[in-house]
């Protein structure tokens, strides 16, 4: 299996674990069971990078009544594409995975997770979110993790599922 295939499999497992954790955050009344799903997601991240979400151990019946319907609208993110950037000074090969939002029907970019091999294991080293207010160009903001700068042209691209919005599709079809 190539490194690209391993990264795609790693990101696919992350997406499923993240979805399970998000649903549990709104529906799982047992805090220990919820925290198991949260820890499963955190295992995908490099040290000092967090997933960015948690809930209180003391959520009320009102919380669950309010948020259980939201859980029904959640969907696992779609993995659109992965690009490999060679020669990053901190990580060597760095992989950028393009993901959709986490609601049913989300058909465009929402997140990028950057993956690198750290001490022999794949880890998410940064998460960037798409600025939803910019409709003219794709503008990514660092949400957590490494501050990445000009990565140059992608050395390799694997396109999996095309996004729907025209601006996103143009980037998907481009060289990146």
Image (cartoon, grey):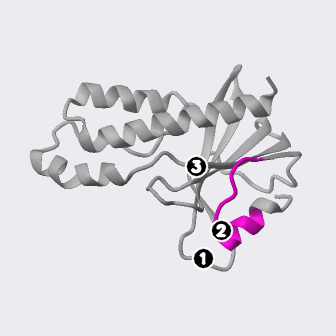
Viewer can see residue 48: no
Stretch in magenta: 159-171
Would you place residue 10 above or below residue 132 in this image? above
How far apart, in angstroms, are the residues tagged by discs 1 and 3?
21 Å
**Which residue is found at the position 68% from the left and 52% from the top?**
161
Disc 3 marks which residue?
78
Secondary structure type for disc 1: loop
The answer to whether residue 84 is left or right of residue 24 is right
Would you place residue 138 above or below residue 175 in this image? below
Secondary structure type for disc 2: loop
Q: Which mark is residue 134?
A: 1
Give the camera-side residue of 35 and 88: 35
Disc 2 marks which residue?
139
Place of residue 55 in the rendered image (x, y in percent of width and height, measured from the top left): 28, 42
Place of residue 97 in the rendered image (x, y in percent of width and height, measured from the top left): 68, 46
Answer whether labels 2 and 1 touch (C-beta < 8 Å). Answer: yes
Secondary structure type for disc 3: loop
Answer whether labels 3 and 2 touch (C-beta < 8 Å). Answer: no
Magenta includes 170? yes
**Which residue is found at the position 38% from the left and 37% from the top?**
21
How far apart, in angstroms, are the residues tagged by discs 3 and 2?
19 Å
């Amino acid at each position: 299996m190539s490194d690209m295939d391993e990264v795609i499999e790693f990101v696919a497992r992350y997406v499923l674990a993240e979805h399970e954790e998000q649903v549990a955050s709104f529906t799982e009344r047992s805090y220990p069971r919820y925290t198991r799903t949260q820890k499963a997601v955190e295992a995908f991240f490099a040290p000092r990078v967090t997933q960015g979400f948690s809930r209180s151990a003391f959520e009320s019946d009102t919380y669950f009544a309010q948020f259980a319907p939201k859980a029904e609208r959640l969907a696992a993110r779609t993995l659109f594409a992965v690009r490999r950037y060679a020669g990053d000074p901190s990580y060597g090969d760095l992989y950028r995975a393009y993901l959709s939002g986490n609601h049913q029907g989300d058909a465009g970019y929402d997140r990028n997770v950057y993956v690198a091999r750290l001490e022999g294991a794949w880890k998410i080293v940064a998460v960037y979110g798409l600025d939803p207010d910019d409709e003219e160009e794709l503008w990514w903001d660092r949400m957590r993790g490494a501050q990445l700068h000009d990565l140059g042209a992608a050395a390799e691209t694997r396109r999996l599922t095309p996004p729907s919005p025209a601006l996103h599709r143009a980037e998907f079809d481009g060289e990146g």
